[in-house]
Image (cartoon, helix red, strand yellow):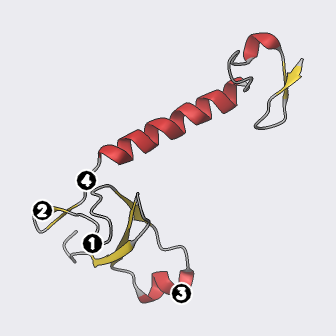
Amino acid sequence: MKVCPKCGQATPLWSRDLRSGLCGPCVRAGAAQREREEREARETIVVEGKPLSCPICGHERFSKMRVSSWDLAVRLPSMTACSCKRCRYVMWFQRDEEG
C-alpha cells in the first residue's frame, strides 16, 4: 500500500490513479473541481445587456463572490461582488429588487 500524496490515506494499488498516485476520492474531487472551474470559465456576466469586462485588464471572465462577513452581509444585503479571474479586481453591483 502507498499513501495518497494529497490526503495521506493509505490506498491499495487498485484504487489509485497510476499517473498521480492519488486515491479515488481525491481523483474524483479534482475532476469535480476542474469541471466547476471550466463551467465558471464559460460563464460571462451580462450587465445592462453587455458582457462585463474588467476595467483594469479587459478580461471578460469573472467569479461571483459571496459576502463572507456577517457585518457586510447585514449592511449590504442586496449587493453582489464579481472578481476578475485574471487580475482579481473586484466590482460591486446592487441587485434588482425584483430578482
Query: Which numbered disc flags the more N-terminal residue, 3 or 2?
Result: 2
Contact check, label 3 and label 4, Cβ < 8 Å = no
**Marks 4 and 2, how far apart in space?**
10 Å
Asked if residue 28 lies left or right of residue 63, the reply is: right
SS for callout 4: loop
Residue at the image position 21 percent from the left and 75 percent from the top: 96
Contact check, label 2 and label 1, Cβ < 8 Å = no
Q: Is residue 59 above or below residue 93?
A: above
What label does residue 55 carry, if any?
1
Please state which of residues 54 and 36 is positioned toward the viewer in this rendering. 54
**Marks 3 and 2, how far apart in space?**
32 Å
* Residue placed under numbered mark 2 in the picture: 50
Contact check, label 3 and label 1, Cβ < 8 Å = no
* Residue placed under numbered mark 4 in the picture: 44
Measured from the top left, where is residue 72 in percent x and y? 49, 84
Contact check, label 1 and label 4, Cβ < 8 Å = no
Query: Which numbered disc flags the more N-terminal residue, 2 or 1?
Result: 2
What label does residue 71 carry, if any?
3
Total numbered labels placed on residues in the image: 4
Q: Quarter holding the C terminus?
A: bottom left
Query: Which numbered disc flags the more N-terminal residue, 4 or 2?
Result: 4
Q: Quarter holding the N terminus?
A: top right
**Marks 1 and 4, how far apart in space?**
15 Å
- Location of residue 86 by image quarter: bottom left
The residue type indicated by label 4 comes to: Thr
Disc 3 vs disc 1: which is toward the camera?
1
Asked if residue 5 lies left or right of residue 92, the reply is: right
Measured from the top left, where is residue 15 in percent x and y? 74, 16
Asked if residue 15 lies left or right of residue 86, the reply is: right
The residue type indicated by label 1 comes to: Pro
Query: Mark 2 packing: few (<14 Cα in 10 Å), some, or many (20+)?
Result: few
The residue type indicated by label 3 comes to: Asp
